[in-house]
Image (cartoon, rainbow, N blue to C red):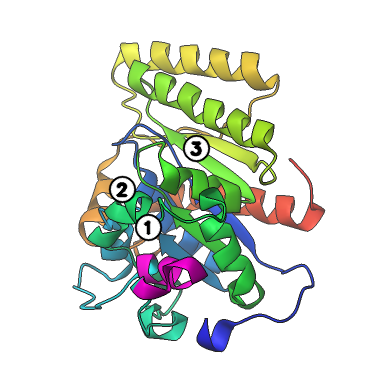
Amino acid sequence: MGLFFNKDKSKPKGKVISLLNQKGGVGKTTMAFNIAHALAKQGEKRVLCIDMDPQANLSLLCSGGVSLEKDNNIFHLLINSIRELKALHTPSVFTDIVVRGETIDLLPSGEELSGFELSVAGISSPRQLILKRFLEKSNILNFYDYVVIDGPPTLGLLVVNILCATDGLLVPFRPDEFSRKGLGHLYGVLENIEDMGIAETPTILAHIPNLVDYRRKQEGQDLEKILGDLKEQFDVPKVVDPFYNRASLVKSQAEKKSVFEFKGKEFDKLQGQFRHIAGLIETWKEEGKSL
């Protein structure tokens, strides 16, 4: 682990916040990017983004669209943390790979991450806990206030690793039948993790209706169905106000900038919504319990 090797066994100050949904196209990466920036603005917090999606879209956003030109990424750090895979180790450490930013730092992804499950298939230690143990062995959670993870739109070993390492979970979704099914599958994985007892189940901090087209009546009806399902499952579902499919959010994503770098009424609204989510996370962290 190099500079970040941790001998301090005390409880770290940092919290891991992940954004997950089995369904792709729900704006998960854009949410992660802007929530990370919102958290960084909460009393100048230190925030690290970890891109755990082999598509590396969060890495592209955090780098402002500039190619990172790094030989190694989060995959190599994870492999280096497994003693049984010494033959696959590289000399890279955290400080070689982390991309320092003005507001947030980044551990980038790469296409190697798509072979993660195959790479660790033969190890005897719990494959579900590789990311969790990497974070525990390192000093990352004592250096950063928040680690924000963007996961892939799947339910494979990468997502299980993310869930086992996560303290607080944010679930973006689109108001359609595919997202509805995706949410059900995600809850099933959470139940499996709880049944296995291998890690503490993360707290679901909020469901985030995203890319909602307010002009389509059907979307309003589908959103009501999903909210009904959430109420049935959680009694008091944690759902924030919808993010509408507006040009302002598309513009910020196209320019590889957070919404906080723009001015105007449309961006004021978006900034307020992301600050609200950051406030929920801050309150939950300070109280040390579920909202």
| Distance between mark 1 and mark 2 Cα atoms | 7 Å
| Residue 2 visible to the viewer | yes
Quarter of the image where one finds residue 256: bottom left
| Residue at 36%, 45% in the rendered image | 152
At a point 56% along the width and 51% down the height, the residue shown is: 126
Q: Are marks 1 and 2 in contact (CB under 8 Å)?
A: yes
Residue 171's tag is 3
Lower sequence index among marks 1 and 2: 2
Say what amino acid the circle numbered 1 marks: Val
Frontmost residue, 192 versus 234 = 192
Comparing labels 3 and 2, the label whose residue is closer to the camera: 3
Chief secondary structure of the magenta span? helix
Q: Secondary structure at mark 3?
A: strand
Circle 3: residue type: Val
User: Residue 56: x, y in percent?
Assistant: 28, 58
Query: Looking at numbered disc 2 in the image, what kind of residue is underneath it?
Result: Leu
Residue 155: x percent and y percent?
A: 41, 36
Q: Residue at x 38, y 22 (%)?
A: 175
Judging by the rendered image, the residue that carries numbered circle 1 is 259
Image quadrant assignment for residue 195? top right
Secondary structure at badge 2 equals helix
Res. 194 mark: none
